[in-house]
Amino acid sequence: MAAMGEPILEVRDLVKYFPLTRGIVVRKQIGAIRAVDGVSFDLRRGETLGIVGESGCGKSTLAKLLMALERPTSGSVRINGREVARARGGELKRVRRNIQMVMQDPYTSLNPRMTVGDIVGEPFEIHRDVAPKGDRRRRVRELLEVVGLDPDHVNRYPHQFSGGQRQRIGIARGLALRPEIIVCDEPVSALDVSIQAQVVNLLARLQDEFGLAYVFIAHDLSVVRHISDRVGVMYLGKMVELGKETEIYDRPTHPYTQALLSAVPVPNPEGRERRERIILHGDPPSPADPPSGCRFRTRCWKAAEICAVEEPPLRIRPGTGHASACHFAETRDVTPA
Amino acid sequence: MKKTSTPMVPAGRAPGGEPLLVVDDLHVEFTTRQGVVRAVNGVSYSLNPGETLAVLGESGSGKSVTAQAIMGILDTPPARVSRGEIRFRGTDLLRLPEEARSRIRGRRIAMIFQDALSALNPVFTVGFQIGEMFRVHRGASRRDAEKKAIELMDRVRIPGARQRVHDYPHQFSGGMRQRIMIAMSIALDPEVLIADEPTTALDVTVQAQIMELLAELRRESDMGLILITHDLGVVADVADRIAVMYGGRIVEKAPVHDIYRTPAHPYAKGLLDSVPRVDQKGQELFAIKGMPPNLLDMPSGCSFHPRCPYRQDDCVTDAPPLYEIGPTRASACHYWREVLDGSHG
Amino acid sequence: MSDTLAPAERPQNGGVGGHPGASRPPKAASLWSDAWYDLRRRPLFVGSAVLIGVLVAMAVFPSLFTSVNPFDAATCDLAQARQGMSAAHRFGTDNLGCDVYSRVVYGARNSLVIGLSTTVVTALLGGLLGLLAGFRGGALDTLLSRITEIFFAIPSILGALLILAIFRTGNVWTVMLALAVLAWPLTYRIMRAAVITAKGQDYVLAARALGASAPRIMFRHILPNAVASVIVVATINLGTFIAAEAGLSFLGVGLRSPDISWGLMISDARERFLEAPWPLLFPALFLSLTVLAFIMLGDAVRDALDPKLR
């Protein structure tokens, strides 16, 4: 892994509420979806931070907030010390050079009516000072080569490529401006199993080659473990546990993390009869109306009175080495070796 | 909060030779603008009562098309079953008149799908939709059907079934909708249940709930389960036997423990090797090179040969048959011995 | 059902090697250059373009097609009224004994001008407003959508009567205006819906993440993906407009004699259709050919703009 440097991305108390409104002519706010509700973390140069959590936990909204595709309700996102959340116009455009994204669905993330050359070259059209006009074609071919595609295919259209190849096109587009941070939002989950490893390897190679820092959002816990230096676990808009990859996977302290890890099917049938599995009951509550205190308490087997009253902050708990948002945090190994 | 261990039931044999369901040399073709696509190309497998057979494969492998052929829900045209038999308790379903077939479909062979929301009708209550099975197939009255619906919702462990029977599909979460689908599919006590990627759209914790539910139901009723999936983890958890499909064929068949321990086909081995493991942290993952085949333009010989590390000259020219490599195992690779040796090493 | 075969698309994936790309233009391709390259090779396009070329030539230089000037009253002979086809009158003569062929040729101008200009104005006005409303949303969208609903509530004949009554004269341009004012809301709606669909796609999000400006997103990403349905509706509308002009003439508010248009000819010939079908059939035939040519053209252009269909 690359040497860890100073924080390149600092996220503090990030909050995003989507208002729920009623009425057509006169809009009245009747509530809010608390998609992201007070998330803080740092990302260091060359590092990979994995973000895991189930649908509705706010991880995709978090990605959009980092990319300044959504404006936060409050809180801050700083890249190299520069505030993103309130940047506008030219300032925002400059910020974007440093943070790019790779999206989940390679079928919808590429404009079907643009050639691959136009798609990968568009960053240079938008940021004209990055590459002189005469140089853009060469740069595009170079980028295609870097991600393992034939540079002679610049004049083809996305539909002429397979899913894995399209994802490579998306990665080439994300690399064009030489960003220091790439937000990967489920970059392999839409791909065939036999292709996923290829793309994971490509992302790892590019990280070494260009010193990239990744925010790697995924629901596949084994892929996240493989590529991440640190991992954050989200539940209902909150970060419930954050630590080094080994800390989260080998010594999880938050009950939700433990349940999540134990629920993952292990691709090895040996000893499956004896495998201990924490089956959570019910579904996550609605983010429009989260429980008081700890948000996980409605499904938690450790829940006590304090959990309903006092929200547990994300901090390092006694006897553990990493941050957890549980009043009763304790280590428990739930993954089979 | 409850802790459980994954339930296991030994596979039961059907009384008297013939298994519950046999797919024999099935061929399915699609006519497209670009030409004829052989989506399923000589697939054979069998299912015993109480057994879970996992059909593993990626998109385009033909695993869902095979299931749709069993159900008789292929769109024909463009699809056409060009050869083969599907024997259910000894009767070839493909030769039955449509009327006889529709009496089996849903009643004795049922299916659940990946996307429960689009499989449910948004304008009817779930109770009505579950009860419909009884009204249509058993001629039950409205009130009896509703009572049955509540029973079934209890059976698939939907909390508060009595109150929720009048709710509409959109009022349920993804996991609960999948339970409703399962309730509908088991309503008439089918002997075979085909589950096509039943948990792919669900979250990990919900996925565990659904897989456990399916295992319990299968145990209770001795129903045979065909689980179609691309998820190696889910297969390892619940399957008794596995059929791995690639490019419209079965490339390996084996009991679950054998294939995970010693895969005998390079594709199965490649899939297993590409799963990230803890001890490989920071290293490059093993990756099967190349892309899944284009069904319109299948490679000659063995369809996996362009991606195969074991390839020899004859792989390009001769399509390997499904070699019997043991009493319960088969592999469609000329060099299965080398693959097995590589797996041991 | 992840691997259910969608025959139209699945086999193309991974088929990168087999694309007939060898004869493609060697330099940087773009949607428009590829579309043009593709169009020139489509018989449908070539056929419709030739047909449209002939019709336009007829409209611009009618004297090339006939030596008879139908505006000259001396060319009509009441004694020769309602004659069948002959060497002197290829398409026969009408109620007033005028030569139908030369009237069809001279009528092309008014009919084509009304059809084309109304189509263009409708497509531009409805298309641009639809693009803006769909892209911006919010108050602008609400306002424009309510306005179009008002237009939808007006019966079109009544509306056209009203507008033409205000102008007091029925000439090509007032007819065009009356038709366009009533027709743009439909195009607006179609465009708006297509834009809203395209706007939600991930590639638009990706462009925003790159810092693309609003005009770039609208014209480079959304418009090419939304324009297809508008093209189809526009070409179908073209025929409707030419026919609607006839309806207005019949009601006495459209073009009037001595002006000539296919619509006028059809409406004049209706009463005596059974005894003399020619004066109606020939302008109707030309009207149909025009509509057909433009619909074919629209289809070809739409297909050429979709890389998947090339």
Image: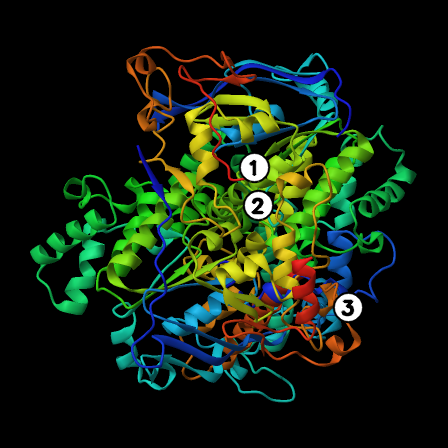
User: How far, Cα to Cα, is label 3 from label 1?
Assistant: 38 Å
* Farthest-out residue, bottom: C86
Is B121 on the left or on the right of B45, as rendered? Answer: left
Q: Disc 2 marks which residue? A: A189
The kind of secondary structure element at disc 2 is loop
* Relative depth, front residue between C184 and C87: C184
Q: Which mark is residue C20?
A: 3
The kind of secondary structure element at disc 3 is loop
Q: Disc 1 marks which residue? A: A218
Q: Amino acid at mark 2?
A: Ser
* Residue B191 vertical placement versus A137 (above, below): below
Chain at numbered mark 2:
A
Look at the numbered discs 2 and 1 and tell me whether their residues touch, using CB distance below 8 Å. yes
Q: Amino acid at mark 3?
A: Pro
| Residue B181 placement: quadrant | bottom left
The percent position of residue B270, horizontal first and vertical second, equals 66, 57
